[in-house]
Image: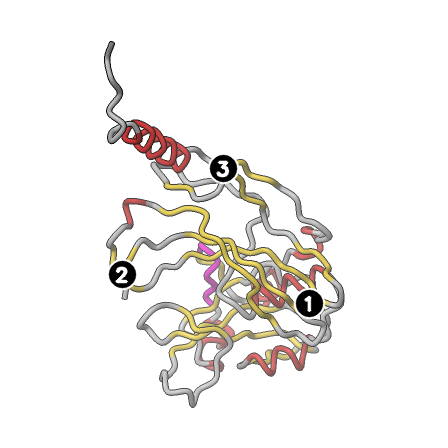
Amino acid sequence: MSTIDKNNIGLPIIILLSLAVMLAGCLKPQIITDSGSLDVNAAATDASAFIRAGCIDTGNGRLDCSSIGLEDNFSCQEIMAQYDLGGLSPKVPIVACNVLLKDDGMDKGIVRQGCLYPMYRRYIIIDEGKYRPIEDKEGFIQYFAPVESPEEALAFAVALTNSRAAHNMTLPEGNMIYSVSSIRTTYVERIDAEFKVHLFYQQFCGCGNHPYFSIDYAVTRDGEVNEISSEKIYENPELFGLCVD
């Protein structure tokens, strides 16, 4: 009769568990499309008012507004169409104006863009037929608060952070490493006097694995946007060790 080596009995189990974890990481998660209380169509925006005024859509959301002088007048390095801001009130045409600023705390900007390159996002609106800049978070809140609807909560969370909405998500091709079994697309839920907004963000700057996260924000009636939680959902092994300045 053979004897069992009790010292090695756990080794096959460890190997099987390791294989199970590896296989789980390769399985694509289920995509759950549920926008909660959000009306996606009402939240949508476009840059058509700026295009009618003379801006040219050059692709990938970029606008060339040099013919009407917006880049020069507002110090924009680039002007971008900004989506998911349709719920803002008052409802005005709005685009992002990315400006190159000294990173010394003296200049105004709403969201820090890029990596070492000191780019900040501002906004330009058309207010009663005139172009008007919104240069900082305080100015944005003063103009658009209070937040009274799911669509406006989404707009504040998108406008005041580097996260993005994903209403129809398609997972990337390739051998991604997944950390979750399901991913719910962007949604908004009212929780007591606040709104919970579910967005997405990729950690791209610096050196590392550059994972993709889902992030939940709390948006108050007064227009404050605070991160509640985040969860890594996947990462691309081809980016491991990549350094981005």
Is 120 left or right of 130, judged from the image as shown? left
* Residue annotated with mark 2: 207
Residue lying farthest to the top in this orientation: 1
Q: Residue at x 31, y 72 (%)?
A: 116
x and y, in percent, of residue 58 in the image:
44, 58
Q: Nearer the viewer, residue 42 or 243?
A: 243
Q: Nearer the viewer, residue 220 or 48?
A: 220
- Mark 1 vs mark 3: give the one in front: 3
Cα separation, mark 2 vs mark 3, equals: 26 Å
- Mark 2 vs mark 1: give the one in front: 2
The mark that comes first in sequence, 2 or 3, is 3
Mark 3 residue element: loop
Q: Amino acid at mark 2?
A: Cys
Q: Where does the magenta region start and end?
A: 59-64
x and y, in percent, of residue 163 in the image:
51, 61
**How many neighbours does mark 3 have within 10 angstroms: few (below 14), some (14-19), or many (20 or more)?**
some
Where is the C terminus found, in terms of image quarters?
bottom left
Mark 2 residue element: strand
Q: Amino acid at mark 3?
A: Pro
Residue lying farthest to the bottom in this orientation: 106
Where is the N terminus found, in terms of image quarters?
top left
Q: Residue at x 32, y 73 (%)?
A: 117
Number of numbered labels in the structure image: 3
Q: Say if 217 sits above or below 185 in the image.
A: below
Q: Nearer the viewer, residue 66 or 118?
A: 118
* Residue annotated with mark 1: 88
Q: Say if 133 sits above or below 234 in the image.
A: below
The mark that comes first in sequence, 2 or 1, is 1
